[in-house]
Image: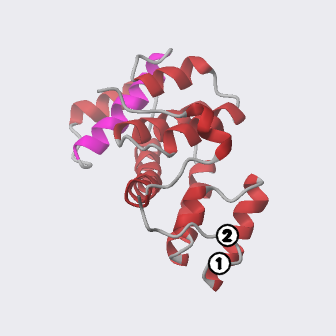
Amino acid sequence: MSDFPVHDVESAPEKSRPLLEKSLKGFGMIPGLHAVMAEAPGVLEAYQKLHQLVLDSSFDNDEKTVVWQTINVENACHYCVPAHTGIAKMMEVSDDIINPLRDEKPLPSDKLEALRTFTLAVMNKNGNVSKEDLDAFYSAGYKHRQVLEVILVLSQKTMSNYINHIAETPVDEPFKKFAWEKKK
């Protein structure tokens, strides 16, 4: 069991309080991840800014979900997979995309599968992707911008996945019904 504090607006460091209020306003609750990040105000602020930048990226909701969940599943994040399952449903992403991501099965379109494959290549090769990796991504219709935006999402998810592993962040009540474990 982790000893990381899970803050609310009153217990959080002063600089984190407005950030948690923003979370409360935006989500109708303070996500457990934000409550843990609040211990270090700069971390919570950076995460919130990265999240907004991802929302403002060129990816549509299906593509955002593919990149988010590909990273979450690959990193076996007990918190982010259920959370992003719920978020994907709120974003009206089809179960035909959500379930294969969770189960590491083929996606319903070649373009989305190319996005997942490229995301995994960036992760697993620590950014040292091959010309073939890039060519396959470009052949699917993606451009340089999306290469960079995959790295943006990876930056966001690295923060959340690693913090959730270390802090053992409890899954939020609305997302418990989407509990998940990586297949062995």
User: Dot 2, crowdedness within 10 Å: few (<14), some or many (≥20)?
Assistant: many
Reading the image, the residue beneath label 2 is: 8
- Residue under the point 50% across and 45% down: 80
Disc 2 to disc 1: CB gap under 8 Å: yes
Foreground residue among 22 and 110: 22
Q: Secondary structure at mark 2?
A: loop
Q: Is residue 171 left or right of residue 181?
A: right
From the image, which quarter does the C terminus lie in?
A: top left
Reading the image, the residue beneath label 1 is: 11
* Amino acid bearing label 2: Asp
Percent position (x, y) of residue 16? 62, 77
Residue 131 appears in the picture as rendered: yes
Q: Residue 150 appears in which quarter of the rendering? A: top left
Q: Is residue 25 left or right of residue 73?
A: right
- Residue under the point 57% across and 17% down: 96
- Residue under the point 26% across and 48% down: 127
Q: Say above or below: 117 vs 50.
A: above
Q: Secondary structure at mark 1?
A: loop
The type of colouring in the image is secondary structure
User: Dot 1, crowdedness within 10 Å: few (<14), some or many (≥20)?
Assistant: some
Percent position (x, y) of residue 87? 64, 39
Q: Per the image, is 111 magenta?
A: yes
Q: Is residue 105 left or right of residue 62?
A: left
Magenta residues, dominant SS class:
helix
Residue 48 appears in the picture as rendered: no
Q: Say above or below: 28 vs 69.
A: below
Q: Residue furthest front?
A: 1
Q: Residue 162 appears in which quarter of the rendering? A: bottom left
* Amino acid bearing label 1: Ser
Report the span colored magenta.
Answer: 109-125
**Mark 2 and mark 1: Cα distance apart in space:** 5 Å
